[in-house]
Image: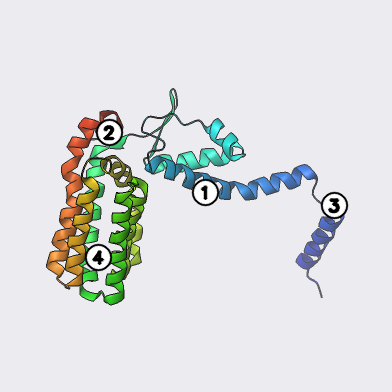
């Protein structure tokens, strides 16, 4: 036996079958459903373009052009842009326009320090528990770095470098730590793209990775931590030099 609510729901269902949505109403519903997915997709695409420096600091961002490129309305584009602004990767100036943000020097220092601290922890754990299979995977990552250097292919090198650090985190067994690192390393990744083209930089990174692997292989936690600290600490020492080479890419945020 139906309750009053049941009768009402039954009537609604009958009405829905008798009076389907118009084409305009259907399009509206579909657009509302697709907007979050489109915004997420556009966000990821723009994020990669900014981090890889395909979109350089102070480059204008046109929501209209991006919407046309993806074949969507400006709504999901605007949502993606606002999210990137929250990440500190886009600056929105109401009277001037929207631009790719410059790299904030102090925030970059802070991000490097946070990452250094976290990865010193994960490499210590990895050195304590790495097995033969783990070591072989790390050795393969270093081989990938050498192959990318030989091309040379800086983007491929960056991917292999990230894979090496990700594998160390996986060996440590705390994926949540890598999630935190991902959140803080956006500006670091932009900065790293500037350092890789420098003469001798790729070779130095490989040597530093080999030192880290040596500590893990020998289960020497002190050596592994020291090697990781040196490797990531090098970025702190290079910031001033890179600011002199590309002054327009940086901003003092003190």
Choose between 21 and 5: the one closer to the eye.
21
Q: To which quarter of the image does residue 138 belong?
A: bottom left
Res 122 label = 4
Q: Earlier in the sequence, mark 1 or mark 4?
A: 1
Give the CA separation, mark 2 to mark 4.
Answer: 30 Å
Quarter of the rendering occupied by the N terminus: bottom right
Q: Earlier in the sequence, mark 3 or mark 4?
A: 3
**Horizontal and vertical percent position of residue 92:** 42, 31
State left or right for residue 70 relative to residue 176.
right
Give the CA separation, mark 2 to mark 1.
Answer: 27 Å
> Height in image: 44 above or below 169?
above
Residue bearing the label numbered 1: 40
Choose between 143 and 18: the one closer to the eye.
143
Say few, some or many: other residues with alpha carbon within 10 Å of mark 2 (under 14 / 14 to 19 / 20 or more).
many
Residue bearing the label numbered 3: 19
Q: To which quarter of the image does residue 123 belong?
A: bottom left
Asked whether disc 1 touches disc 3, contact meaning CB atoms under 8 Å apart, the reply is: no
Res 250 label = 2
Give the CA separation, mark 3 to mark 4.
Answer: 60 Å
Asked whether disc 1 touches disc 4, contact meaning CB atoms under 8 Å apart, the reply is: no
Q: To which quarter of the image does residue 84 belong?
A: top left
State left or right for residue 55 relative to residue 111.
right
Q: Please tell me whether mark 1 sits on a helix, a strand or a loop.
A: helix
């Amino acid at each position: 036996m139906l309750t009053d609510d049941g009768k009402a729901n039954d009537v609604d269902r009958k009405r829905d079958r008798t009076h389907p949505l118009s084409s305009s109403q259907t399009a509206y519903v579909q657009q509302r459903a697709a907007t979050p997915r489109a915004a997420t997709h556009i966000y990821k695409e723009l994020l990669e373009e900014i981090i890889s420096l395909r979109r350089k600091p102070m480059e204008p961002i046109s929501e209209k052009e991006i919407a046309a490129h993806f074949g969507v309305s400006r709504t999901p584009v605007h949502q993606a842009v606002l999210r990137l602004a929250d990440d500190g990767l886009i600056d929105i100036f109401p009277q001037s326009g929207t631009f790719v943000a410059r790299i904030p020097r102090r925030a970059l220092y802070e991000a490097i320090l946070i990452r250094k601290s976290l990865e010193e922890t994960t490499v210590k754990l990895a050195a304590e528990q790495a097995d033969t299979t783990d070591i072989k995977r790390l050795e393969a990552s270093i081989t990938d770095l050498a192959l990318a250097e030989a091309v040379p292919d800086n983007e491929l090198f960056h991917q292999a470098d990230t894979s090496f650090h990700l594998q160390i985190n996986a060996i440590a067994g705390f994926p949540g730590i890598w999630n935190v690192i991902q959140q803080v390393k956006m500006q670091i990744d932009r900065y790293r793209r500037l350092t890789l083209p420098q003469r001798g930089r790729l070779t130095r990174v490989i040597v530093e990775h080999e030192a880290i692997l040596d500590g893990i292989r020998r289960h020497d936690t002190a050596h592994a931590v020291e090697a990781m600290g040196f490797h990531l600490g090098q970025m702190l020492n290079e910031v001033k030099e890179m600011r002199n080479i590309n002054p327009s890419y940086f901003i003092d945020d003190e």
